[in-house]
Image (spheres, rainbow, N blue to C red):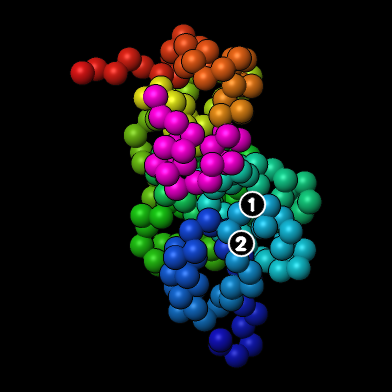
Amino acid sequence: MTAGVVPIRVMLVDDHPVFRTGLVSLLRTASDMIVVGQAGSGAAALRMWQHCRPDVCLLDLYMPELDGLETLKLLRKAAPTSLVLFLTSSEAAADADRALAAGACGYVAKNVEHDALLDAIRRVHGGVRGIRCGVSNAAAPRQPASLGGPLSPRELEVLHLLRDGRTTTDIAASLGITHRTVKFHIAAILEKLDAADRMGAIVKAFDLGLLQPTVR
């Protein structure tokens, strides 16, 4: 740490421990940053926030049970001045738009160079807003509205697997999430599509344009 420099306090929120370990190693190379906390879920991040008091939170978009957007909304209720920078695998412009509209200071895809990420953290800490880094310039197709609100990216993944006839156990193994989390997403899909069961959800999803016939 450089003498006289107050480090930027960073908290990491990502459900992949290996990725968090690599990120900690990267941030240790920056003389003006320090990792003050790590959380593997949105719920854990909310519990840790008051204790860690980070200057900047790096938040993943795709997480089980409580995704990044929901975590951000709850976090901003608890700490309205919180600075959140999404760091996620999605390069989709639509995801970046949603994150920024929800109150994130910036959105960085995991495909960027290390220096770009460090620069984004410094810019957010310095007051810059609306940062987009590593996001595709291609116009993303808009998701047709469901009956009870738009499905999240993870819910759409689960919906496509349901369409393919996959069981709850199959979906959990395919997406690397728990059996309970799959049930949580299915319940949300049924509620948003106002469907009584999985088949009803699939039928409505086709009607709404959320699913397209498979070309063989």
x, y percent for residue 60:
53, 52
Residue sitting at x 79%, y 51% = 78
Q: Which amino acid does label 1 sit on?
A: Gly
Residue sitting at x 39%, y 50% = 134
Image marks 1 and 2: residues in contact by CB distance under 8 Å = yes
Q: Name the residue under label 1.
A: 42
Q: Which residue lies furthest to the top in this view?
A: 207
Up-down relation of residue 167 to residue 44 (above or below): above
Q: Mark 2 points at which residue?
A: 39
Magenta segment includes 167 = yes
Q: How many labels does the image show?
A: 2
Residue sitting at x 69%, y 43% = 73
Magenta segment includes 133 = no
Q: Give the range drawn in magenta.
A: 165-185
Q: Camera-side residue: 12 or 135?
A: 12
x, y percent for residue 122:
54, 66
Q: What residue type is labelled 2?
A: Ala
Q: Main secondary structure of the magenta part?
A: helix
Q: Camera-side residue: 212 or 34?
A: 212
Asked whether the viewer can see residue 94, the reply is no
Q: In which quarter of the image is the C terminus?
A: top left
Look at the numbered disc 1 and give the secondary structure of its residue: helix
